[in-house]
Image (spheres, rainbow, N blue to C red):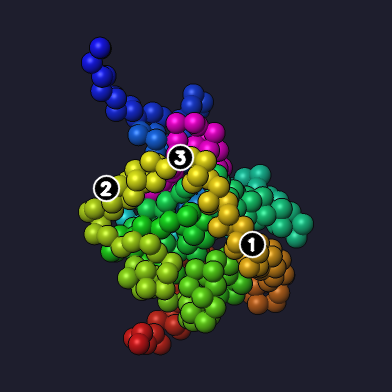
Amino acid sequence: MAPKRRRARTPTRRAPARAPFETIRYAVADRIATITLDRPQVRNAQNTDLILELDQAMHDAAADPDVRVIILAAAGPAFSAGHDLKSVVGQEAPDEWRRLRATAEGRLRHERELYVEKCLYIQNLPKPTIAQVQGACVAAGLMLACMCDLIVAADDATFANPVLRMTGAGVELLVEPWEIGARKAKEFLFLGDAIDAREAWRLGMVNRVVPRRRLAAETRAIAARIALLPPVTASLVKESINHTLDLMGKRDAFAYHFMLHQFMHGTDAAQRALADRSRTGSIAAMVRERDRPFAGRRKRRS
């Protein structure tokens, strides 16, 4: 009888042949796809290019029969600082998506198609997903991480959504009530203060907290165990749990908040905030001015 052949380790593969990604990295090995946000110079702030490339990579992973689990990681010290405001309302030359924002109808399309629909694709993608979070995970960065089935956080991770300080109604998908409960969500959003990884774990937002130096290895070990499941089993159970959340109202709650978010854009408070951005001369200066009154009023959490 011929000797058994040892199963070779699956070689690392790059994305399918096309123009190379510029704002993310994509690799597949051992039935795990790793998608890495790769704009560390701006703390992985999400501009149009990153969102579109991330969406393409997620579709690639979903369609690849060799992929059973997807890890969403980030290069540099931060997971994501949220949407890149310079590309939305700042000094950068407008792209076709930003030009839509000249009208209320276009702004709704921009945020629904580029932000909401692409995030919900990750939430409902028929394969398990794991967010691998280090450093700052802010606003739309938090929204993105919460689209994944699991979150593994480094011990230096922090989570925040300070959008109310700039008169926003939270980001497009209000994940907080589903992640940490209604009462804590109100505190988290009203105060805008960051919570650390341990507090996020205590509240149920995070599955594991691990040392920063072990983040990638620990996340991959979890992914490897999930990859042992029959794909149809993992897919159907994920679908069933997501359906349970929808029966509890998650889908309708997301839709309701998104329309309130759109309404907020047209309020006097929001228009004054836009004027402040123009007056201060830069997004960074506007944020510093926005946060100054809050800086001395933070109290130690009990």
Q: Which residue is mark 2?
A: 217
Q: Is residue 34 left or right of residue 278?
A: left
Q: Quadrant of residue 205?
A: bottom left
Q: Is residue 106 above or below residue 9?
A: below
Q: Position of residue 55 (x, y in %)?
A: 55, 43
The residues tagged by marks 2 and 3 sit, at their Cα atoms, a distance apart of 23 Å
The answer to whether one can see residue 154 in this image is yes
* Circle 3 crowding by C-alpha within 10 Å: few under 14, some 14–19, many from 20: few
Q: Position of residue 229 (x, y in %)?
A: 42, 43
Label 1: element kind: helix
Q: Which residue is mark 1?
A: 246
Residue at image coords 27%, 60%: 210
Q: What's under tag 2, amino acid-wise?
A: Ala
Q: Position of residue 265 (x, y in %)?
A: 68, 68
Outermost residue on the top side: it is 1
Question: Which stretch is magenta?
Answer: 50-73
Q: Position of residue 99 (x, y in %)?
A: 68, 50
Q: Which residue is mark 3?
A: 230
Work out whether mark 2 precedes mark 3 in sequence or the reverse, and give the earlier one. Answer: 2
Nearer to me, 175 or 65:
65
Label 3: element kind: loop
